[in-house]
Image: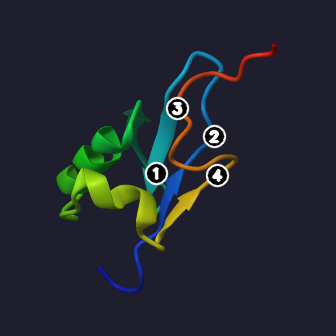
Amino acid sequence: MAGPIRVTVHPPSPSGGRRVRVDGEILGLAHNTADVAEFLRRAGLEIDAADVAGVPWIDWRGVGPERWGPETEG
């Protein structure tokens, strides 16, 4: 693969979970960092789920890796 990899984790969907893209391709809907790590493993990138939150090449859109559910009004 030429150039740096681009991983995007989109904001939580209204029903929960976050869409994960690698170089523009949607890999799936993640519900936690373990899901993100598994999607990346399937794409050929080995990363431990414990490290997902801290790698600089993952773009966390909207909120960071601590939020996975739908937004609630309180």
Secondary structure at badge 2 equals: loop
Marks 4 and 1, the one that precedes in the sequence: 1
Mark 4 vs mark 1: in front:
4
Marks 4 and 3, the one that precedes in the sequence: 4
Secondary structure at badge 4 equals: loop
- Name the residue beneath numbered marker 2: 11
Marks 1 and 2, the one that precedes in the sequence: 2
Mark 1 vs mark 2: in front:
2
Marks 2 and 4, the one that precedes in the sequence: 2
- Name the residue beneath numbered marker 1: 21
Where does the C terminus fall, quadrant-wise?
A: top right
Per the model, the C-alpha gap separating discs 4 and 3 is: 12 Å
Mark 3 vs mark 1: in front:
3
Secondary structure at badge 1 equals: strand
- Name the residue beneath numbered marker 3: 68
Per the model, the C-alpha gap separating discs 3 and 1 is: 16 Å
Q: Confirm or deny contact between disc 2 and disc 4 (CB under 8 A).
A: yes
- Name the residue beneath numbered marker 4: 61
Label 1 crowding class (10 Å Cα cut-off): few <14, some 14-19, many 20+?
A: many
Question: Would you identify the image quadrant in which residue 12 lies?
Answer: top right
Q: Confirm or deny contact between disc 4 and disc 1 (CB under 8 A).
A: no
Q: Amino acid at mark 4?
A: Arg
Point out residue 6 in the picture as x, y percentages from the top left corner.
47, 68
Label 2 crowding class (10 Å Cα cut-off): few <14, some 14-19, many 20+?
A: many
Label 4 crowding class (10 Å Cα cut-off): few <14, some 14-19, many 20+?
A: few
